[in-house]
Amino acid sequence: MLRKPDAYHRYHSAHDRFIKPVIEDFFHKEFPNTFGPNTRSNIADELLAIFNSNNRDSQTIKPGQILWNAVHKDTRADSRNRKLVPVVLTIVADEDISRLEKKKAISENRQSLIARITKEAYDQEALLSMRDIGLLLASDVGIISADRKRYEQKHSCSLPHTGTLHDMGSCITHKYQIVSKYIIEKKDPMIIAKETHHSLKAVDHYLKDYNRVKLLYLDNKPTEYIKAATAMPVYVINQYIDIINQYVKEQNAS
């Protein structure tokens, strides 16, 4: 075996001064018989990636913004494979101050803030829950949900959050909007998907479930029968029944 040159012996150990070798050395010493060198290297890379994504340079975060870990839009918060995404959210913006200068209600300011940060999170591949926003604003979740709904009603939109895209919580706003846009406004499912921040597959799923429940409900089938026939949870069936009743009322009123 060829002898390493003197320069190698003089300088090689200096590599250990960097953070990745420090992490690898930690696992080598603390778990000597558990991880091989390749595994230690991979673990160190993953830990560094987590650290770097959660350690933004102050130059990338503006005054009024914060860093928060939100659920990735393609995973559920209650999933075993849940993935969190570091997102930058604007808690205080110049327009917020302008509204307060004009003596606008705090609730109106909060509605705009909720809309802004849910959209910011979604643009960064993540979703905020109402609990997230309640924590960030030190507010009750009920207040946050009520203000979100007011904003959605006022602007005829559906904000992207875990309640709409992950079917978490008791939110039915997105279901009603999707059905309403399709049946009343006669919009194409592709346009509905874009307007409601849903995939086309999700829109088709909601419309299919709505029609299944509607067919049985208008045929006077009881909820338990609908549950057995569709394999849907009772709470989801009741949400669709609420939508059906609202739609029927609107049709009768017109």
Image: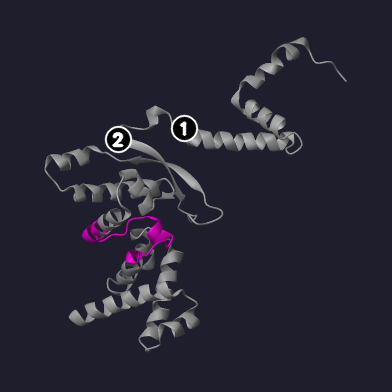
Across and down, in percent, residue 75 comes to: 50, 55
Q: As shown in the figure, which amino acid type bears the numbered disc 2?
A: Gly
Residue at 50% in and 57% down? 78
Describe residue 201's horizontal placement relative to residue 100 as left or right: right
Secondary element type, mark 1: loop
Q: Is residue 250 above or below residue 31?
A: below
| Disc number for residue 64 | 2
Q: Which residue is mark 1?
A: 55
Secondary element type, mark 2: loop
Do residues under tags 1 and 2 come within 8 Å of each other at their CB atoms?
A: no
Given residues 149 and 207, the one toward you in this image is 149
Across and down, in percent, residue 100 comes to: 16, 41
| Disc number for residue 184 | none
Is residue 108 highlighted in magenta? no
Residue at 69% in and 13% down? 11
Across and down, in percent, residue 84 comes to: 49, 46
For marks 1 and 2 on the same chain, the one whose residue lies earlier in the sequence: 1
Image quadrant where residue 93 sits: top left
- Disc 2 crowd, CA 10 A, few/some/many (<14, 14-19, 20+): few
Residue at 16% in and 43% down? 99
Q: As shown in the figure, which amino acid type bears the numbered disc 1?
A: Asn
Image quadrant where residue 156 sits: bottom left
Given residues 185 and 121, the one toward you in this image is 121
> How far is the residue under mark 1 from the one under mark 2?
17 Å
- Disc 1 crowd, CA 10 A, few/some/many (<14, 14-19, 20+): few
Image quadrant where residue 40 sits: top right
Q: Give the total number of marks visible in the rendering.
A: 2
Q: Is residue 254 visible?
A: no
Describe residue 95's horizontal placement relative to residue 85 as left or right: left
Quarter of the rendering occupied by the C terminus: bottom left
Across and down, in percent, residue 218 comes to: 35, 86
